[in-house]
Image (tube, rainbow, N blue to C red):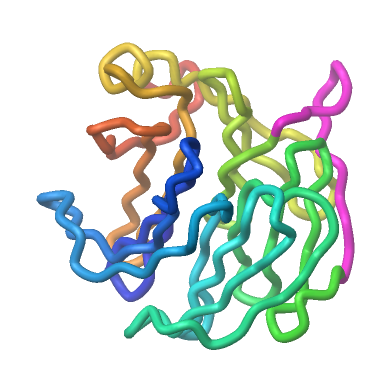
């Protein structure tokens, strides 16, 4: 998920290899798809982000990043990369991408070349399975795949700053869906949202430190 100019955009995968990967502009209040673009079967879409009127979509194992005009969702260009693609966000200058390990890379949005890499860790060691990413108020937020947890990360050092318990969202929102996996921040309103794979609900959330409820 990603917000841009107050509009919500969503990217999907394709677990059944049926050509169901899409990017779409979605109406926040109703969930209705306003505009969409799909990939052919065999291409599993993962993280998306929008920077400078371009929507970037990475793929899980296809080693492709597709770039679209955010207003029309028409394909503009594509990049190749090595490894897997999981989460994607940006800090206003660089694209920020995860690959399912503890590593997060910063990429040039014009060339997709890697500028630098950080490794994410807490006091117990590296944090693997970093999935959906979002950049909020100078921090990288990431879902930790297969868990109900998310973490906030120092983008300079990779140090985990906060661990976020999403178990209540799992309890009330999962239904027949899967893991918690979706973070999006709307700069136009200051609101942040979380959801999961194949969930029918999207939750507005606030991150509150213990003792400050």
Choose between 150 and 64: the one closer to the eye: 64
Q: Is the magenta stretch mostly helix, strand or loop?
A: strand
Residue at the spot 40% in from the left edge and 32% down from the top edge: 196
Residue at 85% across, 27% down: 126
Residue span colored magenta? 115-129
Q: How many circles with numbers are drawn on the protein?
A: 0
Tell me the quarter of the image containing the C terminus: top left
Measuring from the top left, give residue 149's x and y in whole percent. 56, 22
Query: Is 86 placed left or right of 174 in the picture?
Result: right
Q: Image point 82% across, 54% down: which residue?
A: 156
- The answer to which quarter of the image holds residue 63 is bottom right
- Tell whether 51 sits left or right of 25: right
Q: Where is residue 200 in the image (x, y as percent from the top left)?
A: 23, 33
- Image: 33 above or below 181: below
Residue 155 vertical position relative to residue 51 in the rendered view, above or below: above
Q: Is residue 11 visible?
A: yes
| Residue 46 appearing in the image | no
Query: Relative to residue 160, is residue 25 drawn left or right?
Result: left
Q: Where does the image place residue 29, in percent across and percent down from the top left? A: 12, 51
């Amino acid at each position: 998920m990603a917000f841009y100019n107050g509009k919500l955009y969503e990217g999907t995968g394709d677990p059944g290899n049926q050509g169901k990967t899409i990017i779409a502009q979605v109406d926040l209040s109703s969930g209705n798809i306003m505009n969409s673009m799909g990939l052919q079967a065999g291409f599993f879409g993962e993280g998306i982000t929008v920077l400078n009127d371009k929507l970037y979509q990475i793929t899980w194992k296809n080693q492709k990043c597709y770039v679209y005009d955010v207003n029309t969702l028409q394909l503009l260009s594509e990049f190749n990369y090595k490894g897997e693609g999981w989460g994607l966000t940006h800090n206003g200058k660089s694209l920020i991408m995860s690959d399912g390990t503890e590593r997060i890379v910063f990429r040039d949005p014009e060339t997709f070349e890697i500028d630098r890499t950080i490794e994410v860790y807490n006091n117990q060691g590296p944090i693997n399975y970093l999935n959906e990413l979002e950049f909020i108020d100078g921090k990288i937020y990431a879902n930790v795949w297969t868990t109900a947890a998310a973490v906030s990360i120092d983008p300079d050092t990779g140090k985990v700053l906060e661990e976020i318990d999403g178990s209540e969202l799992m309890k009330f929102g999962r239904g027949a869906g899967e893991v918690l996996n979706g973070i999006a921040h709307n700069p136009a309103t200051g609101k942040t949202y979380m959801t999961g794979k194949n969930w029918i609900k999207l939750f507005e959330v606030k991150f509150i430190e213990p003792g400050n409820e």
